[in-house]
């Protein structure tokens, strides 16, 4: 793959310099320009046609949301928001629903060298966004036939890069009469999930809530894991409830594996695991638990993924997962619930 071409958009000259330097130093990314505000950014995007842009949200003249609205409907560039969660959570959640594929939190609002802390995450996200490539995988094992189990008692969804748009499309298409509760994990920094859940609730026939400890999971309700906390499932008094768990050493918090494993421990063959677009392999361990218990697995097809990493790991693991384009995922979930 040729090196992705990137434009850095930020009203801070210091931030533009540091972010550009971090990506150039990787030797894998060409930073072709920087831009100080939204108007400057759109001019440079039109002239240079980059693969990816990094986008600050708070800028003079035309802000980051204005840039996203201007780019709506275009397949490129892919937009990665680099922002401050404690200040801009509502704006950040809106940016994700407007088309940003990932959100990386700046460690501080001040112009200082702590920006270097996000270097590895930024580089990995840019490379994945530009290529859509999955992590390297071993040869595909023999695939077993999908299991035929009972109707789903619990639907669990995991996603990462590109996940906000995927969830927006999927949740808006699911019916209010869905026969099982739905629990979702999205890799997203703390501070954004309450706003994102509220936005999903407005567009969905389902009731969409941010996870709270002890919240009942019931048909017609979708629960989004809280950023920085695992979403665990328990049975209490005969009903399924959400539990919030502190970080456990997993690479991601919340973790798809944690959700899949705890949910399957409770409902067994009544588990339906759904893995949507995302980098890496979070969800694979939990998917093995679902398959072993006799539950069902759906993975988003490469043709609709922003990054075909997490779904590919599960689909190619020989667990009987069914490959489904995102446009047909709601129908497949509804049939199984």
Image (cartoon, rainbow, N blue to C red):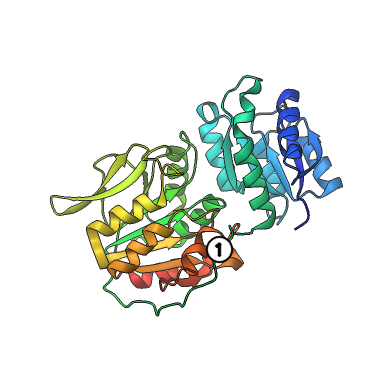
Q: Is residue 174 shown to the viewer in this render?
A: no
Q: Report the residue that reaches farthest toward the front.
A: 138
The answer to which image quadrant residue 26 occupies is top right
Rendered-image quadrant of the C terminus:
bottom left
Classed neighbour count for the residue bearing mark 1: other residues with Cα under 10 Å, few (<14), some (14–19), many (≥20): few
Q: Report the residue that reaches farthest toward the left.
A: 237
Q: Is residue 210 placed above or below 299 in the rendered structure?
A: above
- Horizontal side of residue 161 vs 337, given as left or right: right
Total marks placed: 1
- Residue sitting nearer the eye, 166 or 292: 292
Rendered-image quadrant of the N terminus:
bottom right
- Residue sitting nearer the eye, 96 or 135: 135
Residue at 41%, 52% in the rendered image: 256
Assign a secondary structure to mark 1: loop
Q: Position of residue 205 (x, y in %)?
A: 40, 56
Residue at 41%, 78% in the rendered image: 144
Q: Report the residue that reaches farthest toward the bottom.
A: 145
Residue at 83%, 47% in the rendered image: 46
- Horizontal side of residue 275 vs 64, given as left or right: left
Q: Is residue 47 shown to the viewer in this render?
A: yes
Residue at 32%, 55% in the rendered image: 261
- Residue sitting nearer the eye, 124 or 199: 124
Q: Position of residue 253 (x, y in %)?
A: 42, 41
- Horizontal side of residue 226 vs 64, given as left or right: left
Q: Position of residue 286 (x, y in %)?
A: 37, 58
- Horizontal side of residue 298 vs 245, given as left or right: right
- Residue sitting nearer the eye, 103 or 119: 119
Q: Position of residue 310 (x, y in %)?
A: 51, 58
Q: Which residue is mark 1?
A: 137
């Amino acid at each position: 793959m040729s090196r992705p071409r990137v434009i850095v958009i930020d009203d801070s000259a210091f931030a533009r310099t540091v972010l550009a330097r971090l990506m150039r130093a990787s030797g894998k990314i060409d930073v072709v320009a920087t831009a100080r505000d939204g108007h400057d950014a759109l001019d440079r995007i039109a002239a240079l046609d980059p693969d990816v842009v990094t986008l600050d949200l708070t800028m003079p003249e035309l802000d980051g949301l204005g840039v996203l609205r201007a780019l709506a409907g275009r397949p490129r560039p892919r937009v990665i928001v680099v922002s401050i969660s404690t200040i801009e959570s509502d704006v950040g959640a809106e940016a994700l629903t407007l088309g940003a594929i990932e959100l990386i939190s700046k460690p501080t609002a001040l112009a200082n060298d702590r920006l270097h802390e996000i270097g590895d995450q930024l580089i990995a996200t840019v490379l994945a966004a530009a290529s859509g490539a999955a992590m390297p995988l071993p040869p595909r094992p023999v695939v077993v036939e999908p299991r035929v189990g009972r109707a789903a008692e619990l639907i669990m969804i995991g996603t990462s890069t590109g996940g906000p748009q995927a969830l927006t499309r999927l949740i808006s298409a699911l019916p209010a009469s869905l026969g099982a509760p739905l629990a979702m994990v999205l890799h997203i920094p703390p501070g954004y999930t309450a706003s994102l859940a509220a936005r999903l609730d407005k567009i969905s026939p389902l009731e969409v809530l941010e996870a709270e400890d002890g919240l009942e999971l019931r048909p017609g309700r979708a629960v989004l894991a809280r950023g920085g906390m695992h979403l665990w499932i328990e049975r209490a008094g005969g009903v399924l409830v959400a539990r919030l768990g502190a970080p456990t050493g997993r690479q991601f918090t919340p973790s798809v594996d944690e959700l899949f494993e705890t949910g399957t421990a409770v409902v067994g063959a009544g588990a339906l695991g759904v893995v949507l677009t995302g980098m890496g392999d979070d969800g694979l361990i939990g998917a093995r638990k679902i398959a072993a218990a006799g539950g069902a697995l759906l993975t988003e097809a490469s043709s609709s993924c922003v990054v075909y990493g997490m779904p590919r790991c599960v689909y190619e693991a020989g667990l009987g997962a069914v490959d489904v384009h995102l446009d047909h995922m709601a129908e497949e979930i509804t049939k199984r619930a």
